[in-house]
Amino acid sequence: MTSPLLQEGLCLDIEQTQQASDPAELQRWSRLSSRAREELGTLQCILGSMKDNQVCLLQVERWLDAVQELLSRDATGLGTESLQEELNQCKEYVNEIESVEGSLKQMGENVSAVQAAAVPGLAKWGQDKLDESRGRWDTLSKQLLSHQERVAESQEKQVNLRKDLAEMQEWMTQVDEEFLMRDFEYKSPEELEASLEEMKRAKEDVLQKEVKVKILKDSINMLVSRTLPPGGGSGQALTSELEGVLANYHKLCDRFKSKCHTLEEVWSCWMELLQYLDMEQSWLNTVEEKVQATDNLPESTEAVNEALESLESVLRHPGDNRTQIRELGQTLIDGGILDELISEKLEAFNSRYEQLNHQAVNRQISLEQQLQTLKENEQALQSLQESLSQLDHTLTSYLTDRIDAFQLPQEAQMMTSPESGMLEMNQQPQQIETPSSISWSVTANRMYNTARRVGVPHCDMNDLSQWLTDYRGAMSESIGPDGQLTWTGTATPRVAENDEIRWMGIETEFTTTSADVITTHPDEAGLSRS
């Protein structure tokens, strides 16, 4: 088959030849000319298909090359803005899929048309290129759709992760300003306790965020691990943002823990202070009770001594608690925590402590003096008892030896006063012929001193001597005809009216002892009204 240009030239030659040839030749040339024109049309159609196929091929190859170049890049390593640009490109190429697919279809039709022309050498024309383009199309179109999905997913993850990081940072800033940067003023225990509970809840909320922070960290690390090169592009930016958030979060946790620990220590100090105050107030109540219990004590050595020991035992209370109260209170006051309330409590406690301690110490001194006085009185009474016993023994000896009772007044008259009587007895020992004089003088002197110690200041030696004389005479006169003692003791020393009660106690003790001896041994007494 000749080329279209040759056929076109041949057709012109045939027309020119037809004008000059005979009819037979003209008919032959006419058939030849028709055939040439038909082949010319066919060649022109084939040529048009080839040109159209070339245009479609260029369009398809341009799209395939662009898609292949796009797929060769690692979208996971791009930043958020680059990911958005690549996603836009993917969408653009995806939108061109139908157009490219149409071009491929047109190429198939053109190739089929050329091959169907039964022109020698064109039976397989364009088939290889068409198959190659279709193969690349099938592969790249699927990869493009998958790539677009991955880019969209990667972009969404980055956006969400950055949003989570921003929200986390904003939340930490808000919590820091709300709980850590705010100045708390604690004017009452209720405010302190409420702040402590609020801080504990905030700390728990912060610590619970650790799970979210860990998930966020793992997501970012997983996303960054997929980047090529690792850590490049958006991965590095996300890692930097993550490190900043993690550092701020750990710092926030530490500050919350420290704040909670401080408030817990403050609350513990307050509760410990109240505990020590309660203990000391209880001790002060005991001191007050012990002091009040010492009022109106009976005049008994045992009772006074027991009260004194009880009070001394309470006063031996250690001062460690008061030291703790002072230190805890000062610590809280220096921190500006419950300072007014604590100052009032400490002032009230110290005032009550000083008052009760002063009362207790004074009462202790008073009890010690009272106890000393009672002991001295008991010793004096014991001495008097011994003197009376000695006197009773002497009188019993007198009665047993049947000594004249009327000698006693004369002997007693020797002692006009304690000093002169004793002096005279020392200067004239030869006038005292019997042991009774010496015993009587010693007894009188002892009774005088005892009376003075136990509180009979207005009794003098003359009164005591006269009383002893009367007593001795009355005893002698009280022996009845049957030898029985009928006297119960009526002689009373001359003392001041205010001391009568005290002297009666001494007299009763003396007369009772003497009467018991005389009554018990009437035969030995030998008393008679001579």
Image (cartoon, rainbow, N blue to C red):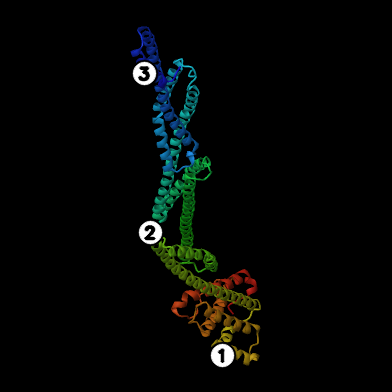
Q: Residue furthest top?
A: 24
Q: Which is nearer the N-term, disc 1 or disc 3?
A: 3
Q: CA distance from mark 1 to mark 2?
A: 83 Å
Crowdedness of circle 1 by 10 Å Cα count: few (<14), some, many (20+)?
few
* Residue named by callout 1: 420
* Residue named by callout 3: 12
What amino acid type should be assigned to the residue bearing mark 3? Leu
* Number of the label disc, if any, that sits on residue 187: 2
Nearer to us of marks 3 and 2 is 3
Q: Where residue 314 appears, x then y in whole percent? A: 52, 64
What amino acid type should be assigned to the residue bearing mark 1? Ser
Nearer to us of marks 1 and 2 is 2
Crowdedness of circle 2 by 10 Å Cα count: few (<14), some, many (20+)?
some
Q: Residue furthest bottom?
A: 427
What amino acid type should be assigned to the residue bearing mark 2? Lys
Crowdedness of circle 3 by 10 Å Cα count: few (<14), some, many (20+)?
few
